[in-house]
Amino acid sequence: MSLVSALNVSDGEVISFTGAGGKTTVMFRLARELVEQGKRVITTTTTAIYEPTLEESDYLLLAERPEEMLRLIREGLRRYHSLTVATGYRSEGQRRKLQSLDPSLIAEIAALPEVSNVLVEADGAAGHLIKAPAAYEPVIPPCSGLVVFVVAVGAIGKPLTPQVAHRLEQVMAVTGLSSGCILSAEAVAKLIIHMEGGAKGLPPGSRYVPFINMVEDEGSCTIARQVAALVLESGLAERVVFGSARGLAPIEVVLSSYK
């Protein structure tokens, strides 16, 4: 199944990605699938992302002033099907990251007639497998119609440590686990549905779809289905999607029987 179908993406929808465990990869895979359907797609961030490769995005557009950015987007989409937009660069370690857009600008970009969808990385995780947000996170644009919270299946069965979890203290508070405790399917499901975890900051009326990433074999499929069943019991999400964002395994959907 395509990621577009699994997430039930609508034309004109703004989609924000939060969590950890490969959300940038999930975002750019979805962008690629939409482009293959003939859509014109904007990818951006309200936090920071690394500069995309040519396989991820057709063109990188940098502009500091909102009016200039809107004009350049309209011009760019006459030539390209996918644009990544940011206000500039910032240094972070050995690599440069793209600077964020103000969340209020996302709605203006989405309203442009040339734009089919806007995809937003709205959270940071520093390469970890799971996370819970700090007080100032995530930075979800209010116009988001769909929020996708990403976790990596590989966190399940591992001890809860700073190497696995971003914002360890917040993850401990949300799951009730102590440092070093094994992350169970139940603990990860709790993280996904908790209002100070994956469900934090959801815009009113938005759809919430957790994505369990790095599911590439039958063993990890079984674990993902366990998490999905627990999440869907809460009634917060109508579906849970899992698979490999890198395309190493099929995308699957578990739908709620409660809706």
Image (cartoon, rainbow, N blue to C red):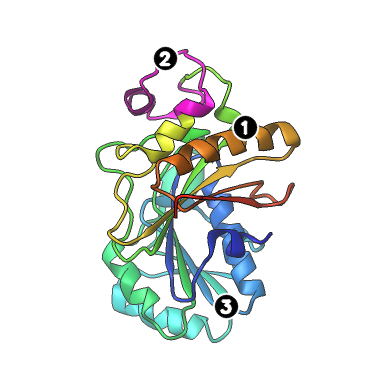
Query: CB atoms at circles 2 and 3 under 8 Å apart?
Result: no
Q: Earlier in the sequence, mark 1 or mark 2?
A: 2
| Magenta span of residues | 162-187
Q: Which mark is residue 39?
A: 3
Please tell me whether residue 21 is drawn above or below residue 117 in the rendered image.
Answer: above
Element carrying mark 1: helix
Of labels 2 and 3, earlier in sequence is: 3
Q: Which quadrant does the C terminus fall into? A: bottom left
Q: Residues within 10 Å of mark 3 (few under 14, many from 20)?
A: some
* Secondary structure category for the residue under label 2: loop
Estimate the x, y position of residue 197 in percent, counting from the top left.
35, 37
Point 49% across, 36% down: residue? 230
Which marked residue is nearer to the observer: mark 1 or mark 2? Answer: 1
Tell me which amino acid carries mark 1. Answer: Ile
Specify the label residue 179 is tagged with. 2
3 with respect to 194 (left or right): right
